[in-house]
Amino acid sequence: MKVAFLTAGGIAPCLSASIISLIKNYNNINNTYEFIGYLNGYKGLLMGNSVKIPSNISDNQNSINIFGGSFLGNSRVKLSNVRDCIKNKYVKCDESPLEVAANQLMQDQISILHTIGGDDTNTTAAELVDYLDKHNYNLTVVGFPKTIDNDIYPISQTLGAYTAAEQTSLFFKNIVNENTTSSRQLIIHEIMGRNCGWLTAYSGYLYMQDLMNMNFFNEIGLSREKWSIHGLYIPEIKFNLKDESIRLNKIMNKYDCVNIFLSEGAGIENIINEMKNNNDDIPIDAFGHIRLDEINPGQWYAEYFKEKLDCDKILVQKSGYFSRSSSPSSEDMKLIEDHAKNAVKYAISENSGVVGIDDDTGKLNCISFKRIKGGKPFNVNYGWFKILIENIEKC
């Protein structure tokens, strides 16, 4: 039996580790499985680019786990976006990407496909299952929920998110010390999160918890307030820029600095409205998402607050690439191992779906592809989030 893997979308601190953990669990059951990986996600599947993965690779699990990213490579390709696939020469003008991908799986005699990615990756996998089923080819697809944003319905905790939050917090622990380089300094920490503020919120929580355990020395200017988060903006909570400018200016006057945690999708309507008023082109990716990296939300807010806070210096720092390329933490590794064990069980029994912790039951099971979708908002009623907000408001 031949098992294939592909990793797609942006990278996260779980990809290589997930593949190796899956292979280890297959070997524990039967050491006759063959393994291949499609290079650069669905792009590799469309173009027939794959590599054989030796079954004994799992003997090096601990060594491989320390690498971030995916040893198979990633890409952002949507099979249903025919125009984009043709434009990038992944398929010919008269070809259907879905048909090309399905034919490649049949040609390679794949029995089980593991897709490790976000909602787009796994809903695309569902389309492949349906297509092949209609053509009497039996393919089992079991997906892994990967995204550092933690924003996939109906999954409680996605792989890689815990690690990304830890790394995002670590990133700011160094960056915040830049407030000693100038008077009236504004630091904006821009964090990934288009529709969901979980990563911004949880990394902020971890950062503030560490801060509460540190010793400070007010008599020489090392005060907890100067190192605290003064503003935290996420898509789930509306905020008034005028009111925030007044509040933050008071903090700047008192502590000579302002530190902001900004989810890249927070208040994005302010930026889009300005771009529309200026008749600027709004960049869109293959999935119809606004290209936030090109819009640069952190810089937009820096320009907005510059005069409002009478800043002498502004520093905008993005932690996204730092956090998402990390190796998985021990907490994420436990999740990966649990997911892999269950994924292999479901795959062998020919149950297609996404293995994840179901919001409805709180249990790890195989969730129907039909229930998978993105844009899941962060629940602001979590107790730890309320503690975070309380600590920020103490400033």
Image (cartoon, grey):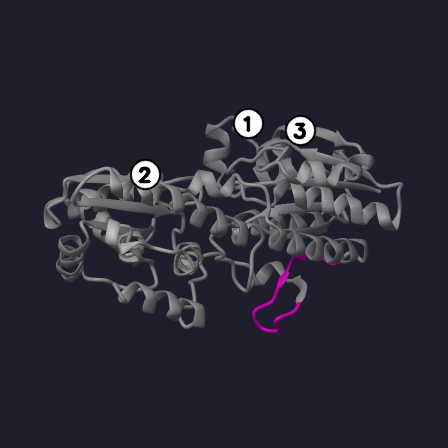
The residue indicated by pointer 2 is 283
Structural crowding at the residue carrying mark 3, measured as other residues with C-alpha within 10 Å and reported as few (<14), some (14–19) or many (≥20): some
Depth check: 331 or 234 in front? Answer: 331
| Residue in view at x 36 percent, y 41 percent | 318
- The first of marks 1 and 3 along the sequence is 3
For residue 171, side relative to residue 303 (left or right): right
* Residue at the farthest front position: 219
Q: Amino acid at mark 2?
A: Pro
For residue 219, side relative to residue 15 (left or right): left
| The magenta segment | 351-363
Q: Amino acid at mark 1?
A: Lys
User: If the image is split into quadrants, where does the N terminus sit?
Assistant: top right
Please tell me whether mark 3 sits on a helix, a strand or a loop.
loop
Numbered mark located on residue 234 in the image: none
Q: Is residue 326 magenta?
A: no
Where residue 257 appears, x then y in whole percent? 21, 49
Depth check: 105 or 246 in front? Answer: 246
| Dot 2 and dot 1 residues touching (CB under 8 Å) | no
The residue indicated by pointer 3 is 48
| Residue in view at x 49 percent, y 51 percent | 166
Which of label 2 and label 3 is nearer to you?
2
Which of label 1 and label 3 is nearer to you?
3
- The first of marks 2 and 1 along the sequence is 1
For residue 75, side relative to residue 108 (left or right): left
Please tell me whether mark 1 sits on a helix, a strand or a loop.
loop
Q: Gap in Å between the C-alphas at discs 1 and 3?
A: 14 Å
Q: Amino acid at mark 3?
A: Gly
- The first of marks 2 and 3 along the sequence is 3
Where residue 240 appears, x then y in whole percent? 19, 61
Where residue 110 appears, x then y in whole percent? 76, 40
